[in-house]
Image: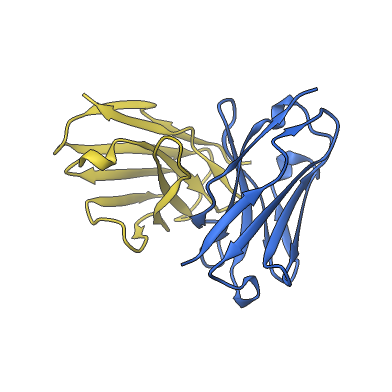
Chain colours: A blue, B yellow
Amino acid sequence: QVQLQESGPGLVKPSETLSLTCGVSGYSITSGFQWGWIRQSPGKGLEWIGTIYHTGSTSYNPSLKSRAILSVDTSKNEFFLKMNSVTAADTALYYCARVLGGNVVFDIWGQGTMVTVSS
Amino acid sequence: DIQMTQSPSTLSASVGDRVTITCRATHGISDWLAWYKQKPGKAPNLLIYKVSKLQSGVPSRFSGSGSGTDFTLTISGLQPDDFATYFCQQYKNYSSFGGGTRVDIK
């Protein structure tokens, strides 16, 4: 059974970098599929952040203006999100998820981790 | 970018009702549309992709239709577990989600 688990600091100061990890169990990242990050906030609803393939190939939401960077560590079966220059608008529940097939549709999600941007 | 608008934002219904939720895209997205269900405190759960393809394990009372810019999610015979919030998602051009439709008990 494939499971995803997000982890990382729950509080980040404005202008700093948000860093999250998604651990994958029950499936090897190198076996295929893409992996992604999505966030959810009362103000913006659900927002796709980006997706990454195990080779490191990425795709990002242009609205984030290149602040997000996704990476992967196949030896640990983990992938990561870094988002720089955060503001209060980046406060949200962050989910990692598996992409179904070759499209940006998410079939398996983590439980989510809340990140608050505040000084 | 493509904006997705769902209607209604809230819908009150009873067990056994037939429920229809609408999703409209600002630009044509062909059949690159998915639907998710979310219960409070839980992650979204994929119901349908490619407009009408049911994800494995999803009950057949859920169905999707539409093309281009206008799409619908129908629940035929609402069950107690179906009271939740539903989101549409386009994945024709990157990806974006609708604002959600909450289905609550009448």
Residue A6 lies, with reference to residue B26, above or below; the image says below
User: In this rendering, would B29 be left or right of A11?
Assistant: left
Is B94 left or right of A66, judged from the image as shown? Answer: left
Q: Residue at x 58, y 41 (%)?
A: B2
| Percent of width and height locating residue B102 | 36, 30
Count of labels shown? Answer: 0
Q: Position of residue B34 (x, y in %)?
A: 44, 51
In the displayed structure, would residue B26 be above or below residue A95? Answer: above
What's the residue at 14%, 39% (across, down)? B16
Residue found at the very far left of the displayed protein: B16
Residue B73 found in image quarter: top left
Q: Position of residue A22 (x, y in %)?
A: 65, 55
Q: Residue at x 27, y 44 (%)?
A: B74
Instruction: Examine the rendering and report whether any part of residue B94 can be seen.
Output: no
| Rendered view: A10 above or below B36 | above
Q: Residue at x 50, y 65 (%)?
A: A2
What is the residue that sits farthest to the bottom in this orientation?
A31
Residue B69 is situated, as x and y percent measured from the top left of the image, at 45, 44
Give the camera-side residue of A14 and B23: A14
Left or right side of B99 for A86: right
Residue B87 in view: yes
- For the residue pair A59 and B51, the one nearer the viewer reads as A59
Observer-nearest of A101 and B51: A101
Quadrant the C terminus of chain A occupies = top right
